[in-house]
Image (cartoon, grey):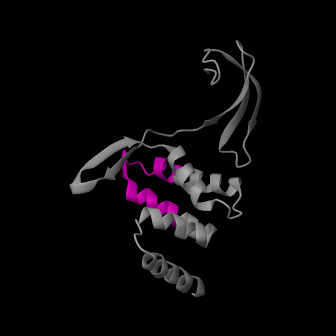
Amino acid sequence: MRCPFCAFDDSQVKDSRPTEDSTSIRRRRQCSSCGARFTTFERVQLREVTIVKSGTEGEERRETFNRSKIEQSVSLACRKRGVSQERIDQLISGIQRQVETAGEPEVASSKIGEMVMDGLKQIDSVAYIRFASVYRDFSEARDFEEFASTVQEAAKD
């Protein structure tokens, strides 16, 4: 593993342990050159999945599934909401598992967005609305009001 501090190509594993949800291995490493310590995570990847993104004017872009993009979006939506990192990791691992085990080589980004929204809906209504505001491209305060009222109505049922 390359050192993130000095870019030396060799490091030693000092400690390995599973994460709390047992979906990855956390490894503490030490660079053989500069002595710096850093952490890496090792996860199982069942298959390579391509995400199909719809652009403007019907254009489609394709890119490899990237777990960290979902992590960043969900963490931002849950920021200052008291949602534990463990719960966020469970949500993301569940989405990743669904995508990889679906058997499809390509998955629409909209499908992943809906999976994230469904998961956030179960975790925290404010995080759900925050994510939806970006995902559904809210442009006015009225968009928030309408969406929040549907969330409140669903909570009453």
- Judged left or right of residue 15, residue 94 is left
Residue at point 38% right, 48% down?
Answer: 104
- Which of the 4 quarters of the picture holds residue 152? bottom right
Q: Going by the picture, which residue comes out furthest to the top?
A: 33
Answer left or right for 56 relative to 90. Answer: left
Quarter of the image for the C terminus: give it: bottom right
In the image, what residue occupies the spot 53% across and 70% down? 129
Give percent across and percent down for residue 145. 48, 80
Q: Is residue 39 left or right of residue 126?
A: right
Residue at x 50%, y 53% (from the top left corner): 98
| Residue at the spot 70% in from the left edge and 49% down from the top edge | 21
Residue range highlighted in magenta: 96-118
In the current view of this chain or complex, which residue is farthest to the left? Answer: 57
Specify the farthest residue to the right: 15
Q: Nearer the viewer, residue 68 or 42?
A: 68
Asked whether 110 falls inside the magenta stretch, the response is yes
Q: Is residue 141 above or below residue 91?
A: below
Write down the quadrant of residue 33 in the picture.
Answer: top right
| Prevailing SS of the magenta stretch | helix
- Front position in the image: 60 or 148: 148
Where is residue 153 shown, x and y percent of the image? 53, 86
* Magenta stretch contains residue 137: no
Q: Nearer the viewer, residue 103 or 141?
A: 141
Residue 97 visible, this angle:
no
Residue 20 x/y as whole percent: 74, 47
Q: Nearer the viewer, residue 76 or 28?
A: 76
